[in-house]
Image: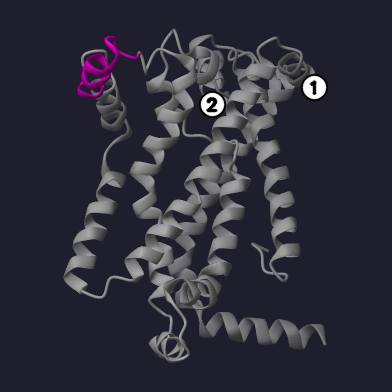
Amino acid sequence: MVSKHKSSLLDYLKKYYFLYILLAPAVILTLIFKYGPMYGAIIAFKDFSPIKGIMGSEWVGLYNFEKFLSSPNFEVIFMNTLKLSFFGLILSFPIPILLALMLNQIRRAGVKKNIQLFLYAPNFISVVVVVGMLFIFLSPTGPINQFFTWLTGEPIMFMSRPEYFRSIYILSDIWTGAGWASIIYVAALANVDPELHNAANLDGANLLQRIRHIDLPTIRPIMAIVFILAAGGIMSIGFEKAYLMQTAMNLPTSEIIPTYVYKIGLQSGDYAYSAAVGLFNSIINIVLLVTVNFTVKKLNEGEGLY
């Protein structure tokens, strides 16, 4: 029985060997650049010294994790990361769906393409340029503050006051990413049979009813997968944008785990401690991914990520 199974497997590999050859470069690159660096995570459990190397450094167990969890900065940094990610997910997740549903109602192909181009364009703007635009537009002498100065007599220090950081970060993320994120939903809605809408029209269904009973059920599996992936990476905020938007005045809300890891690891040279913080963040993401996937599968008739 075993030999028969091996024979069928060999026959299958011989038949489709060319596809595996095409797949091989991607697998090799993934192993080298994704799984290979995981070896370095060992330093999170060591008193790492670049001179002694990873294996020569003293093993300290969970000391670096305990150091972070007992740090006076832990609660602030952890909550800043969680709040920024959670509010970003809740506010930005529905926007691409709404955009896709609206784009799906446009029947003129030329108009639809122009609107899509306009919505997708911000995604291709560099993060550095986006943050530079934010500093220019929201500066005390920028166009937005000129309006507030005319209205109230004094400008608002948007980029310096901590209470504005999350709103600016999330809204700018929605502006740059919502259009691009809507592509997958637009593609799914393109597969909806027009006869379903025609039949619904004959039955007297209005626009909202057609969206509710035809369009939304079509994209519901995709919505579930996108939400699971987004929730699973809820602690993985982009480092570049948060770091570029940081000022000495808004640190109480802008200091998050990725920027903290960068400062501790690369600026202060405490590689073991920064590796422990980064690994802690990854563990939280894995737990969230499994939890959210389990919950969505229960609520979505068994359809989830895995």
Residue at numbered disc 1: 62
- Res 174 quadrant in image: top left
Task: Give the residue displayed 44% in from the left and 52% down from the top.
Answer: 95
Residue at the spot x=46%, y=69% of the render? Answer: 21
Whether 129 is among the magenta residues is no
Residue segment shown in magenta: 142-156
The disc labelled 1 sits on which kind of residue? Leu
Where residue 20 sits: x, y (%)? 50, 71
* Residue 149 part of the magenta segment: yes
Pick the residue in front: 29 or 99.
99
Give the residue type at disc 2.
Answer: Pro
Regarding mark 1 in the picture, which secondary structure is present there?
Answer: loop
Chief secondary structure of the magenta portion: helix
The residue lying at 47 percent from left, 66 percent from top is 23
> What residue appears at the point 63 percent right and 82 percent down from the top-left corner?
10
Report the side of 252 relative to 286 (left or right). Answer: left
Q: Which residue is mark 2?
A: 258
In the picture provided, is 62 more to the left or to the right than 24? right
Which one is in front, 53 or 198? 198
For the residues labelled 1 and 2, say whether their Cβ atoms are less than 8 Å apart.
no
Q: Quadrant of the C terminus?
A: bottom right
Q: Secondary structure at mark 2?
A: helix
Residue 36 spot, x, y in % from top left: 58, 42
